[in-house]
């Protein structure tokens, strides 16, 4: 079920900056960068607004506040992993896109959000709605009668992969990690990998 943060507010057309980027998109991008820099608790609406080059009150034209904006930024980051032709990515393709260097800040945001969800009920509520929405789509990909457990395992694998930068001291190249993660994905979603 989409939330208010998923749908741009109605009214006038989006305001664009000099590069043609809509305010909403600038806010989502700024939210990711600001959360990476300051952490969930440390980031402020003012930080995000300054980075997006808008006034702090302008955020409330698009989002209900910091929590809604940060969760919307996480959703936006994941939505951008999909190809523009709306083709459904395989679990392995999702994982490889997830591990791409360009997704590093988004992985960090996802870690921050999930940790914040353990301390802030409003974050937990938004994350739970998001998880339920995507869980049903992933469960449909599996013929296994225990599809819900498979989906939780899949989500846990992705959340674990969010920590890959934290393990840099082990000096294992990301492609090697991706290969092993893909082997796990073959077990979770064998239907996507016929023998």
Image (cartoon, rainbow, N blue to C red):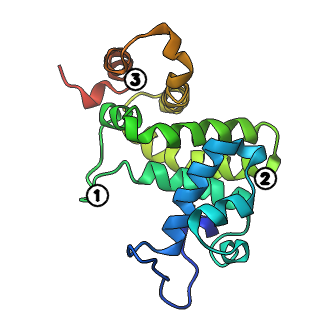
The picture places residue 106, in percent across and down from the top left corner, at 51, 43
Q: Find disc 1 in the rendering and name its residue.
A: 86
Q: Disc 1 to disc 2, how far (Cα)?
A: 31 Å
Q: Residue at x 60, y 56 (%)?
A: 31
Q: Residue at x 74, y 41 (%)?
A: 117
As drawn, the label of residue 122 is: 2
Q: Farthest residue to the top: give it.
A: 170
As drawn, the label of residue 53 is: none
Q: Name the image quarter holding the N terminus.
A: bottom right
The picture places residue 132, in percent across and down from the top left corner, at 58, 47
- At numbered mark 2, what does the secondary structure look like: helix, strand or loop? helix
Return the residue nearer the eye: 187 or 140.
187
**Position of residue 83 in the picture relative to residue 95 (left or right):** left
Q: Find disc 3 in the rendering and name its residue.
A: 188
Mark 1 or 2, nearer chain start? 1
Instruction: In the rendered view, tell whether residue 118 sits above or below residue 184.
Output: below
Q: Nearer the viewer, mark 1 or mark 3?
A: 1
Q: Disc 1 to disc 3, how far (Cα)?
A: 23 Å
Give the quarter of the image for residue 62.
Answer: bottom right
Q: Residue at x 68, y 60 (%)?
A: 68
Return the residue nearer the eye: 9 or 60.
60
The picture places residue 77, in percent across and down from the top left corner, at 47, 51
- At numbered mark 3, what does the secondary structure look like: helix, strand or loop? helix
């Amino acid at each position: 079920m989409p939330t208010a943060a998923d749908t741009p507010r109605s009214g006038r057309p989006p305001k664009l900056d000099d590069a043609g980027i809509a305010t909403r998109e600038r806010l989502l991008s700024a939210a990711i960068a600001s959360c990476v820099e300051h952490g969930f608790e440390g980031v402020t609406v003012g930080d995000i607004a300054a980075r997006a080059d808008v006034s702090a009150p302008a955020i409330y034209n698009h989002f209900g506040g910091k929590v809604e904006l940060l969760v919307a930024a996480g959703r936006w980051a994941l939505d951008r992993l999909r190809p523009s032709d709306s083709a459904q990515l395989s679990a392995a393709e999702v994982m490889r896109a997830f591990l791409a260097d360009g997704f590093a800040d988004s992985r960090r945001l996802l870690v921050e959000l999930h940790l914040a969800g353990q301390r802030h009920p409003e974050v937990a509520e938004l994350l739970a709605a998001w998880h339920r929405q995507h869980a049903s789509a992933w469960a449909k990909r599996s013929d296994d009668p225990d599809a819900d457990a498979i989906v939780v395992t899949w989500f846990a694998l992705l959340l674990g992969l969010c920590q890959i930068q934290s393990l840099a001291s082990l000096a294992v190249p990301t492609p090697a990690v991706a290969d092993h993660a893909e082997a796990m994905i073959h077990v979770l979603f064998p239907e996507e990998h016929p023998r």
